[in-house]
Image (cartoon, helix red, strand yellow):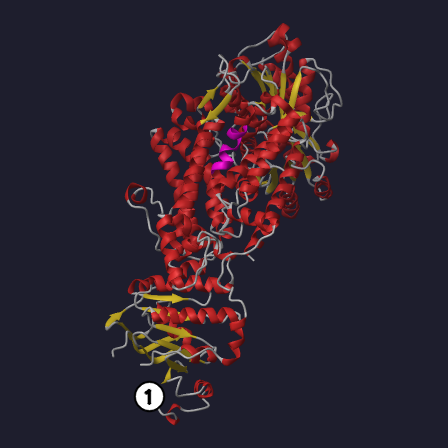
Amino acid sequence: MTQFKFALMGGAAALALSAVPALAQDMTACLITKTDTNPFFVKMKEGATAKAQELGITLKSYAGRIDGDSESQVAAIETCIADGAKGILITASDTKGIVPSVQKAREAGLLVIALDTPLDPIDAADGTFATDNFLAGELIGKWARARMGDEAGDARIALLNLDVSQPSVDVLRNQGFLQGFGIELGDKTRWGDEDDARIVGQEVTQGNEEGGRRAMESLLAQDPTINLVHTINEPAAAGAYEALKSIGREADVLIVSVDGGCPGVQNVKDGVIGATSQQYPLQMAALGVEAIAAFAKDGTKPAASEGKDFTDTGVALVTDQPVEGVESIDSTKGAELCWG
Amino acid sequence: MATETHGPQGFEAALNRSPDSVAEFEQRRSFVQQARHLLHQTPSLVPLIVLVVSVSIFGALLGQKFFSAFTLTLILQQVAIVGIVGAAQTLVVLTAGIDLSVGAIMVLSSVIMGQFTFRYGIPAPLSVLCGLAAGAGIGFVNGTLVARMKLPPFIVTLGMWQIVLAANFLYSANETIRSQDISAQAPILQFFGNTFRLGADEAGRGGAGFTYGAVLLILLVLVIAYVLRQTAWGRHVYAVGDDPDAAELAGVQTRNVLVTVYTLSGLICALAGWVMIGRLGSVSPTAGQFANIESITAVVIGGISLFGGRGSVLGMLFGALIVGVFSLGLKLMGTDPQWTYLLIGMLIIAAVAVDQWIRKAAA
Amino acid sequence: MEPILKARGLVKRYGRVTALDRCDFDLYPGEILAVIGDNGAGKSSLIKALSGAIRVDEGSIELDGRPMQFASPLDAREAGIETVYQNLALSPALSIADNMFLGREIRKPGFMGRWLRALDRPAMEQKAREKLTELGLMTIQNIGQAVETLSGGQRQGVAVARAAAFGSKVVIMDEPTAALGVKESRRVLELILDVKRRGLPIVLISHNMPHVFEVADRVHVHRLGRRLCVIDPRRHSMSDAVALMTGAMAPESLNEFA
């Protein structure tokens, strides 16, 4: 089961190994995250810092104040250029708006790697190290369908998304889930346009507990018979669970999620979440730092995974109720690999 | 010593012929003036009317789905936190101040309650007290800076907001404490998440649901309404907000009033932090980021004047409920959530316009 | 007769500016004493010293023969000196009754008052109404109405009634007619005389010479931070007073009365 994940990472790892650690004299790299409060980015920073130390690179970290704070990220890029950094790792808040600044950095000779969130267009960066979010959604969708068996035909589905602005991660996970579950998709670049009768409704959560609870409550007010809930991430799932608990339905509703943070994996163990797709921010950051080191050495740019326009850093399904036909790891293994 | 007085000046003799109506307190009023006067006397009337009208409209449009005990009490549950923080905000706004740090105090207090229990193994009830004390303490610092150092409330609480939020992230290390751990080891932290249901079916579904948090909101608003209306301290809060110099000269100890107002505000926010643990189940350091804006929204829509001295805490409750009704009603209708913000934005501006209009009743 | 309120050698400095320069002051029982002086003569410093709003650097104040140290307006109030400030010190949004009792509310007896700290509204409103009627002010219908709904003269009436209700020794009035129209000023002057008839001595600060000469028993002329002289308004003219207070005439040229 774990081979699954490592197989996906193989390409990226091979590339990374080509970097030679020693020569990095006075080399600086930048890490720019959306925020420095989200555990996902905290973990990413940890991974990058550890790898940078190992390679003797000075890593400078920047972050927006809140998710969506693109101005701070633009300022951070400018600082990095002025600082003479070799490369920038960025999780962009505004995937389109940041492109001109990224362009400036590349013109100044820096390697720009998008982490986690692809830029728009994706080739605006020299490389993208990210989770295949569509695959992440597809895994939980397939799992849910197999888990429900015959009932899948009359499932009552609630979709708890991230934000009304429909960032790509939101769309990919949502659409992946629906495809995995066997629902015919509308426009693949946006969520909310499917007309399958099994979908009760779609709400946004901002990816936190309060949003998850509120969204679940309003969907339950529309249809109290909901029995399958897709959530954008695990905090939203935890909030949805509280809403279900308050009306005594927590036991008969299936919740699926994406992320694989440690509290989320623990929630899989406790039966709060049925299954979650785990991603690997530490790996993302470490590979990113290695790519910058390689670029500084001989100008090599990272190559995308086969058949994809980005470097896939892997995703694995974590569940304690494995089903036929979908590879998964159990929560104990998931807990070893979890972040934050 | 002379005790006799002299007559009026000659040029004022004409006054004898003019009607001596200066000291009369009766005035004739047109209907509009009377309405304005009524609103002036009862500032919570406007939000109450808006609330009733919006509930009726959504009820008519959505029928049973909206106009059910389940949905209506759900709205109350959803506004519990904003309402409680709004009660704190009301006190501060009545003194012509503003408290931007309410949400941060709430989150830090909830984190303290959780981390003290789980990190240091302090008994949960004691941790709750620590959290409440921390909230009151931060409020006290706010109040002291505003009252003694004469710093503008906006600046003080803007700074405190950043300080408390940063302290929250540093201290908690962004660690979420899971709902399942809390209910297993320290269920008292989730006390306000308990629910009792009226008219539910056998499986406990449907019917009216009241979380203890929602009950607390109602009780808190009633207590504060009583205190503001029926005690000297409450009258002093209004007097300080109205005209602090006049209040001081009239014998109100304005500095003490301000310090107690901000301290109480901090304490109520900490209480909201406890309620928030009940609602989310978990202790999350990233929760409640917008509580300051949301509470100010409730206060303004509730007809409380940002210039101080006018409005009632009941109005704030109605204001919070209006926001709750709009957001849930529009969600049930399946509209884009941005419409909610658009409508609420319009309500805010309308509320302030009405406030200005009512103030003219004074002229 | 002994002065009820007596000050000797008051000195108040603000940096290098001396606002009060060894100033003396006497107010006798039952009289209306007007204090006049040009702008910047130190009138308001004198009044603030007497009402406890500032602390003097030197000098003594005696009330009824007892030395006083006022740290705040509250101290002066406790001692029985009430002040009607030029801005009236009323809270516009509060009711007439609430304003009259601001800072000295009456609480309900028993549990409600002691533990729930409930106000005794009926008692406060009744007393407020009594006071207003006593001063012949009121055709008041609603004592619960907000002060901001009143006219300038009516507000002045409320402020004077408050001072008269609580002032047991002295009432100080700072420019009570400055913001009022002709008719309203007339009512307020009558009000001042009403208060005097009830036996309270009044210190009246005013720029309005006709008003001063109409109601005052004695006129304290203030100049350059001290009392220049005291004149009798029936023996001296307004032009004398103006000449004295602007320095155009020396007090020695008058026939001083004791």
**Residue A187 location, quadrant:** top right
Residue B233 location, x and y as percent? 38, 49
Q: Nearer the viewer, residue A294 or A172?
A: A172
Identified at 39% across, 52% down, the residue is C125
Prevailing secondary structure of the magenta residues: helix
Q: Amino acid at mark 1?
A: Phe
Chain bearing mark 1: C
Q: Which residues are magenta?
A: B75-84
Would you name the residue on which mark 1 appears?
C257
Left or right: A176 in relation to C163: right
**Residue B180 location, quadrant:** top left
Up-down: is A313 above or below C65?
Answer: above
Is B189 in the magenta? no
Residue B264 location, x and y as percent? 41, 44
Is B83 in the magenta? yes
Q: Quadrant of the N terminus of chain A?
A: top right
Q: Is residue C15 visible?
A: no
Label 1 Cα crowd, 10 Å radius (few <14 / some 14-19 / many 20+): few
> How many numbered callouts?
1
Quick one: which residue is furthest to the top in this view? A150
Q: Is residue C188 visible?
A: yes
Left or right: C50 in relation to C153: left
Residue C209 location, x and y as percent? 47, 80
Label 1: which secondary element: loop
Quick one: which residue is furthest to the bottom in this view? C253
